[in-house]
Amino acid sequence: MGSSVNRKILLASRPKGIPDESNFTVIKESIPEIKEGEVLIRTIYLSVDPYMRGRMSNAISYAKPYELGEPFLGGVVGRVVDSKNSRFQVGDYIEGRLEWADYNVSDGKMLRKVNPELAPVSTALHVLGMPGLTAYFGLLYIGEPKDGETVVVSGASGAVGMLVGQLAKLKGCRVVGIAGTDEKCSYITEELGFDAAVNYKTTENLETALKTACPDGVDVYFDNVGGEVSDSILSLINFQARIIICGQISQYNLENPSMGPRVGGQLLKNSAMMKGFIVSDYEEHNDEGLAKLSQWLREGKIQYRENVVIGFENTINAFLGLFRGDNIGKQLVKLTEE
Amino acid sequence: MGSSVNRKILLASRPKGIPDESNFTVIKESIPEIKEGEVLIRTIYLSVDPYMRGRMSNAISYAKPYELGEPFLGGVVGRVVDSKNSRFQVGDYIEGRLEWADYNVSDGKMLRKVNPELAPVSTALHVLGMPGLTAYFGLLYIGEPKDGETVVVSGASGAVGMLVGQLAKLKGCRVVGIAGTDEKCSYITEELGFDAAVNYKTTENLETALKTACPDGVDVYFDNVGGEVSDSILSLINFQARIIICGQISQYNLENPSMGPRVGGQLLKNSAMMKGFIVSDYEEHNDEGLAKLSQWLREGKIQYRENVVIGFENTINAFLGLFRGDNIGKQLVKLTEE
């Protein structure tokens, strides 16, 4: 199974504005040999995520950018196909931050074993992985939603947003999602149990629509998008509201910082908080988060949807699709059968 | 001592933009009689504060606005001149939120006794009162400054700002103040021990000047002013920076919310927090805060300056002077001798 060469995606140039195919190069190499202590991993699933846009440039980024001519790195679920490391056997499933490639070599230190009997292995890239922990820490550690409060989430049908809403429902909140197609809005209300959804692209006046959807105001806003969508929330926040800045996908492709209404006055008037974070800020709580998420998944309290494209050659387009709003649920690329 | 009539300042009209004399009416009444359980208070000091601008309109306000035709309310230090309340004796000094008037009647419930032997009674309106607690809670409870961190404060020579800087010095921080005259800048560096000061009115490029003053970036920004001054801090914040929104004096007189660079990207990239507050959010800790502030004042670790104008008739002008940047230190109006 699998190809006999190792394909790999490199950063060819830093995008100005919206990235396109020209920013990427695909190279072919021979499948690498492993040394003592290493494992060879065959990629099953690649994760494409909005935050990667930040690493393509220096504009908005929490971490070291990708280097020109170097491979993209991201979440990968794969299988060990060769091992000179006593912790790993051939056939083990793993998840790690690895190159966008058919094969990766690793010393195993940053790899997490995935048990295929607990849940489909792809969930290690969403509910039981980085997006799941992002939703968990952001909502519960920063947002601290209380029973009866109103939680609004933007990017509501994305990998993080769909979990945020479901976790907020588990906490007894009224949950309103903001998304960009009627199909996404139906998905979150009809399948995921959100109380209301607002299509920001077709609504005439977003602020009015949100006001209707949030008759008691907004206590927690989980922001994946930024820009005008988030501006429209500000006049609706309640006393001691918490705004969690998880992503700003509407802003990643802008060449200059965008202008909007200054937020200081609303935060002051409402003793409100706005906080950015990255999932690794809370990594000491990873085990707790994964245990809780696994439990809720097992008990059927969390639903998810994957948007899987097949074939390594479709990776770049799947990534670019994130900025077109193509995906409902977690966007994955599947390279090979499990 | 004192006048035989009771002068009182009422809100005549809500200002559009910068308030002026026409927004106020001064009336004269006879000195009120007290009933059982009440006290009559002769005002010694009136406090004029920037936050009162918010209560003149509905624009930016954390609390119920002043009503048209009703008296202004604010911090008053006075002396009991008549009492039918067993808790208070004639001659007692008190501090309370009372009318801008020569005399006030109170049921005593919200009055705080002031001990004139501990410190000058006027300090109950700043270091040992609302501005002191505002600096204390905002900096220490929200900002949580750590030894060696850099703290920037805007409105640095005002009643709150000058305390914030001194408290940050006590915590071992590098402290940079932003103020609007060279005299204010000299005051905070030469008399209060701030490490650096930036005059935002005369500096050619505020961001560059702040960068020079903060070679290790900004960990805590205590914001009293908002607007462009605060915009210029954003590119300098460090990972997990805390921005405390205490006031937005540059914005209070604007008729529409002002536009500026959106903050989401910088907060996200730095896992940074921005939080508004009002001193009453922390009122359960008032005793602790006042005890600490009293101790530091006694030990000479806190300096202060008052800008005292004499005469009730100068109250309105003293208030309007806050928005002209007239004051260094706490602006007070003194009506009568202690």
Image (tube, coloured by chain):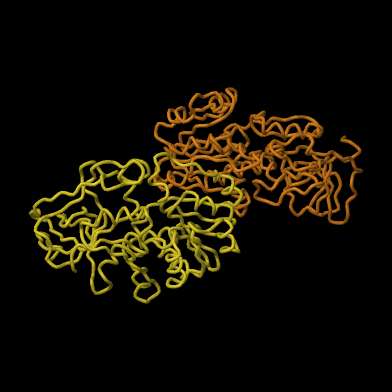
Chain colours: A orange, B yellow
Residue at screen point 27% across, 66% down? B122
Quadrant of the image for the N terminus of chain A?
top right
> In the rendered view, would you say B219 is above or below A225?
below
Depicted B193 relative to depicted B71: above or below: below
x and y, in percent, of residue A232 in the image: 48, 35
Q: Is residue B264 left or right of residue B304?
A: right
**For this view, does A116 lie left or right of residue B231?**
right
Comparing A22 with B227, the one in front is: B227
Using the rendered view, name the quadrant where residue A17 is placed.
top right
| Front in this rendered view, residue A271 or B68 | B68
- Left or right side of A35 for B45: left
Asked which quadrant contains residue A78, the reply is top right
Q: Position of residue B287 (x, y in %)?
A: 32, 64
Residue B95 at least partly seen: no
Indicate the position of residue A278 as horizontal and vertical percent values: 61, 48
Q: Residue B138, position in %: x, y?
A: 42, 58
| Image quadrant containing the C terminus of chain A | top right
Which residue lies at the image location 32% right of the left edge and 66% below the top edge?
A: B306
